[in-house]
Image (cartoon, rainbow, N blue to C red):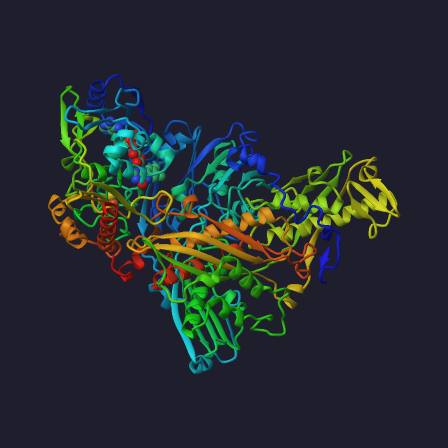
Amino acid sequence: MRPFTYERAESPQAAAAAAAKTPNARFIAGGTNLLDLMKIDIEQPAHLIDVNGLDLARIEGTDDGGVRIGALVRNTDLAADARIRRDYPLLSRALLAGASGQLRNKATTAGNLLQRTRCPYFYDTNQACNKRLPGSGCAALGGFSRSHAVVGGSKACIAVHPSDMAVAMRALDATVETVKPDGSVRRIPIADFHTLPGNTPHIENVLTKGELITAVTLPKPIGGHQLYHKVRDRASYAFALVSVALVVQANGSGRVALGGVAHKPWRVEAADAELPKGAKAVAARLLAGAQTTDDNAFKLTLVERTLAATLAEAKERTA
Amino acid sequence: MKFDTPATTNPIDRLKVVGKPVDRIDGPLKTTGTAPYAYERHDVAPDHAYGYVVGSSIAKGRIVAIDTSKARRAPGVLAVVTAQNAGKLGKGNFNTARLLGGPDIEHYHQAVAVVVAETFEQARSAAQLVHVDYARAKGTFDLASAKGSATKPKDGKPDTAVGDFDKAFAASAVTLDATYTTPDQSHAMMEPHATIAAWEGDRLTLWTANQMVDWSRGDVAKTLGIPKENVRLVSPYIGGGFGGKLFVRADAIMAALGARAAGRPVAVALQRPLMMNNTTHRPATIQRIRIGTSKEGKIDAIAHESWSGDLPGGGPETAVSQTRLLYAGPNRMTAMRLAVLDLPEGNAMRAPGEAPGMMALEIAIDEIAEKVGMDPVEFRVLNDTQVDPENPKRPFSQRRFVECMRTGAKKFGWERRAARPGSVREGRWLKGLGVASAFRNNLVMKSAARVRLERSGRLVVETDMTDIGTGSYTIIGQTAAEMLGLPLDRVDVRLGDSSFPVSAGSGGQWGGNSSTAGVYAACVKLREAIAQKLGVDANTAVFDGGDVVANDRRVPLTKAVAGGDIVAEDGMEYGDLDERYQQSTFGAHFVEVRVDAATGEIRIDRMLAVCAAGRILNPKSARSQVIGAMTMGVGAALMEELVVDKRLGFFVNHDLALYEVPVHADIPHQEVVFLDETDPISSPMKAKGVGELGICGVAAAVANAVYNATGVRVRDYPVTLDKFLDKLPPV
Ligand SMILES: Cc1cc2nc3c(=O)[nH]c(=O)nc-3n(C[C@H](O)[C@H](O)[C@H](O)COP(=O)(O)OP(=O)(O)OC[C@H]3O[C@@H](n4cnc5c(N)ncnc54)[C@H](O)[C@@H]3O)c2cc1C
Ligand code: SF4
């Protein structure tokens, strides 16, 4: 960890302005990702802006019948919220499938969206990694890539976004609300929020310099059976090999998003339409153009099988 | 004292304290966070600075240049030590690679520098500024491709053969020829390797986490080129070792060098991401097993060959050792071959040899039993032997293996196992039961202790024995209490200091039996001294309830020390009983698993171990040892693998986020049964080891249960879903 300066933000806009004017500044929320990365010299901020004191920890209704989740709502509180459990059970289930109780107590909504990949080469500063050090290469290509992306990757990076929460938000058509240093606000559909690696894997989302996430909103509840199925190597907390977020309506229509397969929560709207045809057809659409390695090719089979099991479970509940 | 004839009745047989499931006497310290571990000894070195170790970023090659100037100028930095300014260093007897690399680099994350600063944060920050230029050399990193170049190891007993294996195998009615692989594994203990070093003139004290105090004291001296007498090593509390702390590691040497350079004490803990490549690991193996039986399932021929790799000068993983002893069969052969690999140093990890050996052998037994059409419990019972099968004149000292199998089968409900694999389904789960033998040799090691009866009536025991979380404090206290007829709370046990008599140390599951036997010897001497003081005959006197009872008279022990403390020191040495008899520990592991029919996720439902391991000195701490070992066995079965990057030559998943081990949610239900037995051939304690027995066979029992559940056989550990998903029935 390198020496850094620290301040507490007074307001969201002040936080954004401070971040824009101080070189190499970072916001700190729960710190569960940022601090780990600072300790091993991957994140090297010169200045930390602590946003924890801001009034961004509320969950409240929106005018259109949806819900606004403050950027600082802790993962534990969000998962346990009565309205979320009733109206958006998918989100609650995805949150509870992630990390551990202690981590969820600290982790925030915004921090979770912005957590960084778990690619082992990203974590080892001796290794080539375009995400950590643009232009240095990608050690995962041709290396150990069992947990890596099967869709949307590039020659520069095949890392996955590790969040469970974000996968549910993607299926629920969430919108990310931000404030910029000049005080203007933005609403970014989650589909557009995270980016694919392309030639710039160090860029992971569309936030601009200083831009602060203030909330995530969800449109009005869509009902249906909402299931989050996370597959992992052990029962205790672990990152997903793959995960499936599924919403199925009584008439068989629905939505599906995947975790653990791409640089962002993965949804292909055209695949939703295939849901009545079953897992094979949906998986084919979702994973069209997949590029696998020897280590991660199993994910294609795993996605299809997990999807089939999740669809079967949804059907059972409908019956 | 020499132990060269089987034990007869002795004071331990009274079992007033020994054999009772008493709580660990160090338990309250540990649960209240007041047991001082090495890195927390701020009391002994309040002014200590912090060292941070820099590891090599290449696997093999040379340091061309190393620039520490920036690091030296960083805030708070007191010293930077590299091979250039460390002075001449030797290499310990127990180390394969040097603990400070440069200019030659032998493996990834080999220490190349230690940065010493006022605070930990300053040391860590400055460590990023050490700039090293390397010249990479080509290395060999892949066991499978290096297998062909493997040679017969020079030391030990790489090959054995009895009868004519090839002929018998060719003529067998039923045969199996299968190859299994086990991966490199990490000890991944909770407490990292950690040391505080302080020099006083040319004398060095190390407060460290080390399982073998005397070995390591010698190796520190040898590495630093100073007399052994000038080194004091103190290691009273150790947060897990599993073999990873048998030897001196970089933390100790770098702390010593850092302290010398900085002119004050220095604390070094290896950072977690460095541990997997900087320290030792359990080497990967490739194992070929061939078994030939009669139609009825009697083994005619059995062969076990194993290939492993290590750095030049290293040794093989002795994965065939159990196959020399576990099952009968007139025609047999075993062989070990060693390849040179430029990966980090391979070495002992909990039950070296048997743990990976049993992972392979016990799947093979499951496979051949199925081919014969026999229940795997019955197959094992049929092929039991009461003598060393390579040398039938040598009996086992005790072998109640069949009883373990039978007891376990009954208790576990083995009869409910469906012989046809893949045939039991409950909702989304495929269910299966698996069994495996447990087997681990019992080793005895010379061990000494000093005991002192104080005027207050308290008994103090001192030995350099270590407690790595195993319960040594408690069983040593129980032994001394039993010998002197005292309640346990009148005994003080002091361990892990090289100024105490040299013990067996903790390793190879020899510690419990050997260290208590050493305490036994010292107590015999103390009893003699007390008896003499009281004018009674030591051989007939009974030490009971704080008194000495002789000639129908009860005299309080305290009377003997009215004039001053009485001290006695002795140790136990062993004759050739372990050559005349084969001493081993036995058990049976039963496991029930469920496998998600869609995703292939494997979850453990319940586990049972039945162990026959001599006298159980403390059933509570012994049980803790066995359930811990079973948990580690589940890790070996289902998730633990140090993944080798075969291009770059290092273990990629070098932290606990990526090297997964089983934790609470993975282990729902465990049971342990100890057969009631004593083994008078092993020591006067009549005890043997259990801490390693508990892991041997577990992984295979899990793998066999997965096979029973799914009908898919996985021969490459760990058994992860990607290895069999495509063979599961459609969803
Ligand atoms: C052992 C372990 C296991 C885990 N397992 C899982 C798992 O299974 N599934 C899963 O989904 N996650 C898992 N996680 C990740 C965890 O969910 C994240 O660490 C957590 O959500 C991050 O939230 P935080 O508030 O602590 O973020 P921080 O660490 O504080 O911040 C993360 C990033 O977000 C930025 N940031 C924070 N707030 C804002 C804001 N308002 N606007 C703009 N930028 C902001 C920070 O600058 C930083 O770059 C695990 C983490 C650990 C350590
Ligand atoms: S996959 Fe991405 S994160 Fe991983 S090494 Fe390659 S560039 Fe870095």
Q: Is residue B435 visible?
A: yes
Residue toward you, A86 or B270: A86
Looking at the image, which is closer to me, A203 or B419? B419
Task: Describe residue B233's horizontal placement relative to residue B477 as left or right.
Answer: left
- Residue placed furthest toward the top: A10
Q: What percent of the width, then of the height, locates residue B216?
A: 56, 47
* Residue A42 image point, x, y percent: 29, 36
Q: Residue at x 30, y 33 (%)?
A: A79
A35 sits left or right of B96 in the view: left
Nearest to the observer: residue B16 or residue B387? B16
Q: Nearer the viewer, residue B276 or B32?
A: B32
Q: Is residue B464 visible?
A: no
Residue B374, x across and y down, in percent: 45, 72
Q: How many marks?
A: 0
Tell me which corner region of the image, top left, top right, bottom left or bottom right, holds residue B8: bottom right
Q: Quadrant of the C terminus of chain B?
A: bottom left
Residue B209, x across and y down, in percent: 53, 42
Locate the N terminus of chain B by quadrant.
bottom right
Report the residue that reaches farthest toward the front: A319
User: On screen, A178 above or below B12?
Assistant: above
State which image quarter holds ligand 1. Answer: top left
Quarter of the image for residue B728 reads bottom left
